[in-house]
Image (cartoon, grey):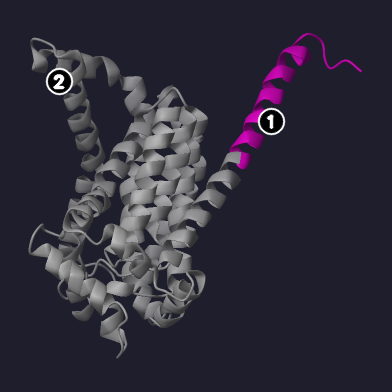
Amino acid sequence: MNTLRASLRTHRALLLIVLLYAAAATVLAGSLPSPSDIFNVLAGFLVAILTGPVFILCGYTIRVMVVQRPHRLCHYLYHDLRRYLSNERLLHALPAMLLIPIFASSFTVFKAAIPRLHPYTWDATLSGWDMALHGGVAPWERLQPLLGHPLVTALLNFSYHFWFFLFYAVLYWLILDTRRPLLRMQFLLSFALTWIALGSIMAVLFASVGPCYYGHLHGSDPYAPLMAYLHEANQHIPVWALQVQEMLWQGYQSKGANGDLGISAMPSMHVATAVLMAMMGWRVSRAAGIALSAFAVLILLGSIHLGWHYAVDGYVGAAGAALVWHLVGRMLGSQAAVSAVSMATVPCMSKGGLTS
């Protein structure tokens, strides 16, 4: 019980942020949910809460098979995990594990509500900014000689979808981590604040659909050659992004009747989150920093090449994530310094009061 109380105190800032965000999402959702809506939310909650641990378990199992190579794999995994997943560790992680699915559900509500709050009017402007920043040529055209090959497209397509698995694995690894309390909380708070400030507030203010949908909203489509190339590449190697893009557009057109996960281009949350993971990686080790930074570059390139985002979406996402990361780090550093001073003062006071 003491461990749980301590964990709740540790997560009080995250708890406040997530509950306020969830309350805003509830207001935004409007009418009371039907029984089927409640069932879908509960099912999504369970999927979200299990996704991260499953990804971590798969990665851990592969690592054991490659590095340790025990004679009795299941026996080794059982005893090692039982030792790792102590009651103290699980109680320490419990508040965050319960809050993350609530946060993810709230984010989905906000994203789906974007066209109700602000029409998609920024695409032409963002496309123009892209051209202006890159010498009058669209970024995808500059990248096409390098990236416009089916195998390269397949690599970027895989990386873009692998982002989901890697993010959840990193997220739940940090949730369960007890060795790096400041880094852990910096990542959790930065993730929540970045997705609120960039993925909800800025996404509404700069409502846009992205290059892959540009032709649906405007008569002239400068991204038609890019989409034509992607469909051609799909004939050789599956480009999963095309199926996801079609699914999202059908959901948008049905106005929620066929499910609406929401469409938003500015800013790129794929890039923002990849940058957060890279900055976290540099704090863990040089190798992790290099690997996650390279992955962030792949995500930025993939966001442009696969038609999801304008380049400026990625630039803003990266800059915004870096700013939030440093602000949260400074706040936590100040709190840690105050706590250290307070703890150092207590023994002096207990010995007869403060000296002049």
Q: Position of residue 175 (x, y in %)?
A: 37, 34
User: Vertically, is 53 above or below 303?
Assistant: above
Regarding mark 1 in the picture, which secondary structure is present there?
A: helix
Residue at numbered disc 1: 338
Q: Main secondary structure of the magenta part?
A: helix
Separation of residues labelled 2 and 1 (CA atoms):
45 Å
Mark 1: which amino acid?
Val
User: Vertically, is 303 above or below 28?
Assistant: above
Q: Residue at x 35, y 29 (%)?
A: 176
On the picture, is 78 further left or further right than 186?
left
Q: Position of residue 164 (x, y in %)?
A: 27, 48
Q: Position of residue 237 (x, y in %)?
A: 10, 57
User: Vertically, is 28 above or below 152?
Assistant: below
Q: Residue at x 31, y 79 (%)?
A: 214
Residue at numbered disc 2: 65
Q: Position of residue 186 (x, y in %)?
A: 50, 39
Q: Residue at x 32, y 88 (%)?
A: 218
Tell me the tag on residue 347.
Answer: none
Which residues fall within the magenta stretch? 330-356
